[in-house]
Amino acid sequence: MRNVDILSKEYCTGCGLCANCCPHNAIEMISNEDGFLMPHINNNCVNCGLCASKCPILSQKSGKKPVADICYAVQCRDEDRFECSSGGAFKAFANYALKNGGAVCGATFNKDFTRLSHKLVKKSKELDGLFKSKYLQSEMGDVYKEIKDFLNTGKFLVFSGCPCQVAALQQYVNYEYTNLITIDILCHGVPSPVAYRYFLNEKNPKKKLIKKVDFRDKKYGWGKNLTIEFSDGTETREPYNGTYFSAFLSGLNMRECCYNCQWASKNRVGDITIGDFWGCADYRKELNDNKGTSLVLCNTKIGAEFVQKCKNDFKLFEQMAFSDVYKVSEKINWAFHTPTPKNRFRKCFFKHLKEDGFYNATRYAQRQILDVGIVGWWIQNNRSNYGSTLTDYALGRYIESLGLSVAYISPPNFNRDYAGEFNKRYGYRMTAQYDYGSMIENNKYIDTFVVASDVLWFYDAMIQTGYTFMLDFVDDNKKKIAYAASFGKIDKFIPEEEHPKVKYLLSRFDGISMREQQGVDVLKDKFDLSSTRVLDPVFLCDLECWNEIARNSNMEIKENFVFAYLMDPTPEKAMELQTFADRHNWKLVTIPDRQNNYQDKAKILAKYGLLANASLEDFIYCFKHAKFVITDSFHGMCFSIIFRKSFYALVNRARGASRFEDLAENFRLKHRLLENMSELNVKPYKNDNLDYFEVEKYILSEISKSKEWLVGQLSSEKKPIKIKESTLIDYKLYVLQQQLKNK
């Protein structure tokens, strides 16, 4: 394939050059879901490669010029400036072109002000529509062809547009015409035309005939208001810090390529660059009279000569050094040095735009409405379980890799200010602090709720948190997913009298997956609900995710070492570990679980390579660099497999054996399970080395199936809740019984 389809969509500027230059009419510019024009290849394509060779991005011909030698602060006469957004520079250039038999090309609205497109103008009476800044992307149509045809007459033409449009025009005409003056604007990015139309409709609920849209109305000063005038003489006005400009300046509604703009730099693409000279009063107070001042950069000789020809139309024409201009503008005008940063809630904006309109989409995005909220024991502190923290971290990282925004929902009464350094260091977005009764507030900011993995449906945990982990606080119209949930030990299962409520709450879920097959069976047997078995979230992250954490450890162990992570150490286990390490001539490094009785555990391991108060980074470092791993932890077993380490896992029946046995069964690793630590050193010795070659396909297959399930749940439409009548009746009886009990 040699056409523009090879260009990643996030870099396409929508300039339309490819459609203009295609000799086979094989390219159509069609709006994408966000309202931006994108090239679509039809069946006429012969793969000649012309479009790809012309594309300014693919050809890497940016057309950038050296930094301007000549710069001006300019102001036209007051009556002319009032018709322009800043100092009137473009009006002076356009007037000169037409007075001298030339033409002008710039952006103008259609009759009802719903679309913006570039237009070639040869008559003064048509110029007014080209004046004033318009904050949305213009359609180019066939204008490049029209421009080339006009240039071939020998007359000169002034073209004004965004830098990407200027670069496209220069490519189209092969830089061959000396009668072409190109002007690029200091551009912060182009907002979506569809978003603009949503805004326009909200400002015009009575569908009045629109007479004018002025993004930069000067009635109250330079750059103060966005005004829409109607044919009946009424108008609506929004301040510069209102909804539309708030969305624009925060990067919510821009084209994807604008966040990577190669022309947002000191090296400009046009013969001339123009823009508002914001901050000009910092250079000299008199330059700002609150009526607008333009900045003009002369990037080429032809540009400088043209500006000189127009200088008599300016009442202020003050030359400045570029270093002075840059010093004044760099803090205010990003277009000089860097693209507008991509707002991480851009996707949120466009999602809500279609459902809730422009105002609400902006409000939700600015208030940080997120795609997914993770509910679990994600909090890291000096007593948190390593596995619990990391399983929630992995789930969040994987969901974010799918392009979704993620928040970690604070459990009831949890003050997020006390979240651990790990949570803060790795950029967790944490919800506000709510008590049980106020947890419903989370519904305002989150679309989909995901119950994280680990034993969150273990009854002892529910005693502490109520039914938070069964999403009792989540509205019916929100998507609810359980990923790799677990009931833990079945001998401490949820009391029978609570079953009606549990069944009702779980029936509200759109999708349930369990970490153990035992959980799948229990869910079916006890509550008549179907589910799918999946892997723990730690397997969803790419290996580099864990390598990154390991690199952040301050540890460095140079010797070969066996690493033992123990939930329940005993003196007997410790001695067996030391014997195993000595037998292999390896150093022994141990980390105990810190959730309960840490000091007692640390005391047992004090003489056996204890790594006291190990951080999560140290924890992962040990798995990555160990020669061998021995653990009685399910997550210890998981990380051994993730790093493809030789290991033994002591089945911890006191904490629940099914999780060990399921994982070993699925990965064909049952021979790595121990029932007693003494098995490590029984003669004849086991073959301690583990060759992953035979089991790799099973590991990758299970990971793929787990990812597929989660992606399917996250990407599917929200389904209406269907709860069996018998479940509803049982639940209503349960509620009535609770009310009677509490009287």
Image: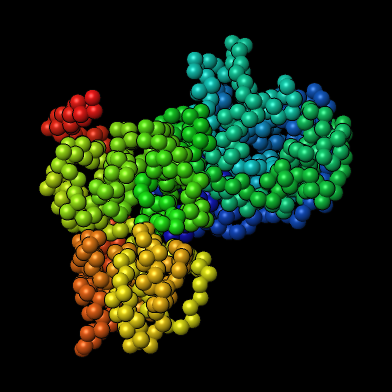
* Front in this rendered view, residue 68 or 254: 254
Q: Residue at x 56, y 37 (%)?
A: 191
Q: Position of residue 91 (x, y in %)?
A: 75, 32
Using the rendered view, name the quadrant where residue 491 is placed: bottom left
Q: Quadrant of the N terminus?
A: bottom left
Q: Position of residue 332 (x, y in %)?
A: 71, 42
Report whether residue 100 is seen: no
Q: Residue at x 30, y 71 (%)?
A: 570
**615 left or right of 723?**
right
Q: Residue at x 82, y 29 (%)?
A: 289
Using the rendered view, name the quadrant where residue 502 is placed: top left
* Front in this rendered view, residue 433 or 133: 433
**148 left or right of 179?**
left
Task: Give the total number of marks visible in the rendering.
Answer: 0
* Front in this rendered view, residue 42 or 449: 449
**126 left or right of 341?**
right
- Which color scheme does this rendered protein use? rainbow
Q: Position of residue 729 (x, y in %)?
A: 14, 29
Q: Quadrant of the C terminus?
A: top left
* Front in this rendered view, residue 440 or 588: 588
Q: Position of residue 653 (x, y in %)?
A: 21, 64
Rendered position, 406 above or below 223:
below
Report whether residue 563 is seen: yes
**573 left or right of 402?**
left
Q: Residue at x 26, y 62 (%)?
A: 702
